[in-house]
Amino acid sequence: MRRFWLCLLLLLLTGGQLVAAQPAATMHVTLGNAAVELFGPWKFRTGDDLAWARPDFDDSGWAAMDMTPPEGTADPTLGSSGYIPGWTDRGFAGYSGYAWYRLTIDVQGANDPLALKMPENADDAYQVYVNGQRIGAFGRFTAHGVTAYSTLPRAFRLPDNLRSGPMTIAIRMWMDSATPFNSPDAGGLHEPPVLGHASAIAAQIRLGWDDIAHDVGSGFLEVLILLLALIVASSLFWLDRKESAYLWLALVSLITLIGNAIILLVNFLAWIGQTPSVILEDDILTPVRIGLWVVFWGYWFRINRIGRLHREVWGLVALLAVGTALLRPPLYGQVVAVAAAIYLVPFLLVVKLALAALLFWVTYQGIRRHEAEGWLALPAVLLAAISQYQHELRLIHVPTAFALLGFQISLGTASTMVSLLLVTVMLSRRFLHAQRKKEQWRLEIQQAQHVQQVLIPEKLPTVAGLTIESEYRPAREVGGDFFQIIPDRDDGSVLIVVGDVTGKGLQAGMLVALIVGAIRSTAQHDADPLLVLNSLNEELCDREHASATCLMLRIADDGMVTLVNAGHLPPYLNGREMQMEGSLPLGVIAEPEFPVMYFKLKMGDTLMLMSDGIAEAQDEHGHLFGFDRIDQMLRAPMTAASLAAAAQNFGQQDDILVLRIERRGEPKAVPQLEPAMVET
């Protein structure tokens, strides 16, 4: 692309002609109003000595380095033509550090100021000298070392006195020891420098920036896609905290967004050094991003033992990050021997591929468990893997870039965008499905509430001789506590039942409906509490996971009480807890022995029946409401509503039910039973 624009520029600036000959080490250049690529051959030597910048230095013993692009060569990263392999591929494998290029030219026909345009693809920093005078640099060279940046379009004007005649151009290059791990043929210049009139070079610099915009412009589109995915995933997680996949996709999008921002920043501004940006992007963000993808798909497919997956993933991520850091300055070459790369590089490749294997194992498990959804997600998984393994694809000579409408599109960028779009659509689909399911549950719970409102009386029946108060406060929409008051119009007695089923929510509400229906059905034939509880126990034993505590008492019109308990809290008589034998709840074993107690309610006596939600109320510090507090409160006259409100305000954890029964009025003339209280 750049060669095309250069040719067009030469046609527009019609005065330019190029004549190049190579007797000995001198390149003859004739300039009109144009520019010429300095193919050389250049002289090249590794090492460093500032004396090598002098025009009178004898470089005849240096190696020749022709800068003519070989036929069929292309940039291994972007795939662009005109790419020249670096020194590691031209006889200096494994070398990093300083190296020099020298070229002597004889310029003729130039009348205007000249400028030298440096390649936009170079490893990694350089200083440019003309006739021993430094005219510019890219990178920061200090006594403590060199800070390199991602190469940007740069051109340097030659001194006004240098417009024609012999010139010696010396380029002092420096390459980071980590650069060869990012490119298989790194080192030095990958394009020839261009010499020309300052106006022509300025036009080429503008074209260079235009090329960068076309090369990395797709990254801005990727940023928009990442922002969309981040917003959607974060919003869905905010609306549904139980679906952890939303959170992990938000983290994937955030980490990828940070990495892309760094790439865009270093491609337009020399703010972040090349080594810090490489360490942050390649050594930290890339392993973390791969790990986040694996964990995301683990949550998406609801893999069993997700904790084990976390340990395996983050263990591999830590190995990859630490191992890669060992191959970066300042550790590599100082703390870690250069020869260690022979073992570290294959090891890190295996670790990175192990993460890929985990990703595909998770996908396989997802397809096994959720066949349709797993196959639907497979393209997104494959694209996510492609986007994270660009370097490995380049190593096996898979093209990782292509041109579209004049823009260079990275295969990783395209894969990331399409993958995130697919995943976002799938997440939205899952969210809508979950919302529909929640709506169904809401309607079912609403129906259960209506059933419970019918089963648990809001208006208590009138019972002669008794004042009954009730207070019921469920912890959820559908509670598991229940009570029934069933008067017998024939003999004036009343059957009173309180209980608490196992569990909470809709399932508990349905069990309450079953129990209340069974109690009412049995009580129509025989109101004996023991008989009713035994019948109810048989009903629950025939069902799985159906149990409940229950306290049942029958109060005759003369105040005589028959009390049977099935694992429920004993009642309080006149503020004191009644002593009863313990028993198992209903539905635990067949044919249990429920304790039975007989006693008489005198005029003014009160019974307080309650569920364990009172005693188990808990404040923010973990302190229980407790039985001691109940005993203390019941020493004074207490309504059912007051006791329930005190427990709820303390910190409700379970359903709260309180039933207060007081005997009042004149009893009928019936024989007194002796003894007054008997327990069997």
Image: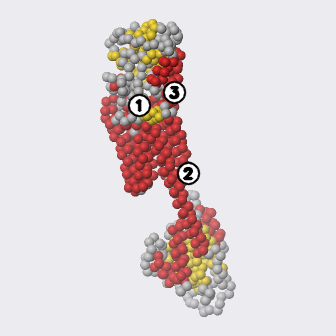
Label 1 amino acid?
Answer: Gly
Image colouring:
secondary structure
- Nearer to us in this view, 529 or 191: 191
Q: Residue at x 37, y 27 (%)?
A: 73
Seen in the picture, residue 477 relative to 429 is either above or below; the reply is: below
Label 1 crowd bin: few (<14), some (14–19), many (20+), radius 10 Å: some
Image disc number at residue 448: none
Label 2 amino acid?
Answer: Trp
Residue on which disc 1 sits: 79
Q: Give the farthest residue toward the right.
A: 665
Report whether 41 appears left or right of 575: left
Q: Earlier in the sequence, mark 1 or mark 2?
A: 1
Residue on which disc 3 sits: 210
Quadrant in the picture for residue 545: bottom left
Q: Residue at x 50, y 77 (%)?
A: 566
Residue on which disc 2 sits: 238
Report whether 480 appears left or right of 132: right
**How far from the left and from the top, in percent, is residue 98?**
39, 21
Secondary element type, mark 1 = loop
Spatial CA distance of label 1 from label 3 is 17 Å
